[in-house]
Image (spheres, rainbow, N blue to C red):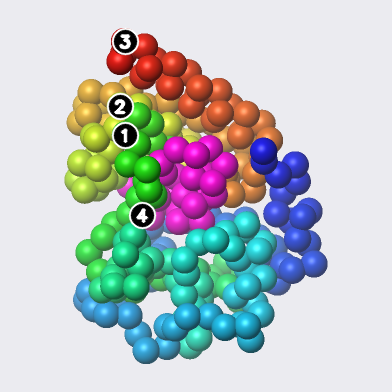
Amino acid sequence: FFKHKTPYEILSGLVGSEMCIRDSFNSDTVARQAEPTSLPESIREADDNDIEYHNFKRYWGIEDVPTLIDVKDNRIVFPLESVWKSYKGNAIGRLINGEPFRQDKWYRYGGDLDHLLINPSRDYSNIIIVEDVISAHIARKIFGIPSIALLGTSLTNNHKAKLAEYSSMIIALDPDAYLKAGEMRQTLMLHTGVTPKVISLQDDIKYYNEIDIENIKREIHNARAIYNKSLT
């Protein structure tokens, strides 16, 4: 059901210098366009010649995720809206390859959305909260429940309003943000009346750590049992 190796072990022949480091997301270091706007002309649909782009998607196992490419800055571009061909600057880009530890690894192209919500089935029983868009897509793929990428580790009023629609929540931030996850739990308890479960991850979700996956699956099972009992 899930991969038994990390992306490095599975696709070690595809990684470039920038892929070989841990991929963390800090909202304080996300570059951004000054004003909301339409997407730059350098962004287009990828074609067969965009080898690094396709390797990047295979590396993370997100081949089925709708994305574009920014050919000027060599970024893979993730839409932040479900109607992905009509968004007005609501997108975030991730460097495909580049110098390690660059501060502009993630880039906001404008727009007013501060998150990516993946809930195609409109299921409001449970949601998993992560930091970045790659983790959100992978979490949805692995666990089959809605996921939300906060685009960082800080909760906005918009985040809290969206999360208030769900009966249970699982917070699965990167390991270096565990203390932040505890603060987030307290904030959501006060705002929504729901007590989120904080998962102490050994690694970021997108690295397919088997222990982390089993722990999250267990919490999802428990949350579903409680939710189903409440309906009877």
Membership of 137 in magenta stretch = yes
Residue 185 visible in image:
no
Q: Earlier in the sequence, mark 4 or mark 1?
A: 4
Assess whether mark 1 and mark 2 are in contact (beta carbons under 8 angstroms).
yes
Assess whether mark 3 and mark 2 are in contact (beta carbons under 8 angstroms).
no
For marks 4 and 2, give the CA distance: 19 Å
Q: Earlier in the sequence, mark 2 or mark 1?
A: 1
Numbered mark located on residue 172 in the image: none
Query: Looking at the picture, does residue 61 appear above or below residue 45?
Result: above
Q: Earlier in the sequence, mark 4 or mark 2?
A: 4
Label 4: state its secondary structure: strand
Label 2: state its secondary structure: loop
Numbered mark located on residue 124 in the image: 1
Residue placed under numbered mark 3 in the picture: 232
For marks 2 and 1, give the CA distance: 7 Å
Q: Position of residue 81 (x, y in %)?
A: 32, 61
Amino acid type at circle 2 is: Ser
Start-end of magenta stretch: 130-154
Mark 2 or 1, closer to the camera: 1
Q: Position of residue 179 (x, y in %)?
A: 44, 34
Left or right of 91 on screen, residue 220:
right
Residue 206 visible in image:
yes
Amino acid type at circle 4 is: Leu
Amino acid type at circle 3 is: Thr
Quarter of the rendering containing residue 122 = top left
Membership of 89 in magenta stretch = no
Assess whether mark 2 and mark 4 are in contact (beta carbons under 8 angstroms).
no
For marks 1 and 3, give the CA distance: 17 Å
Left or right of 93 on screen, residue 155:
left
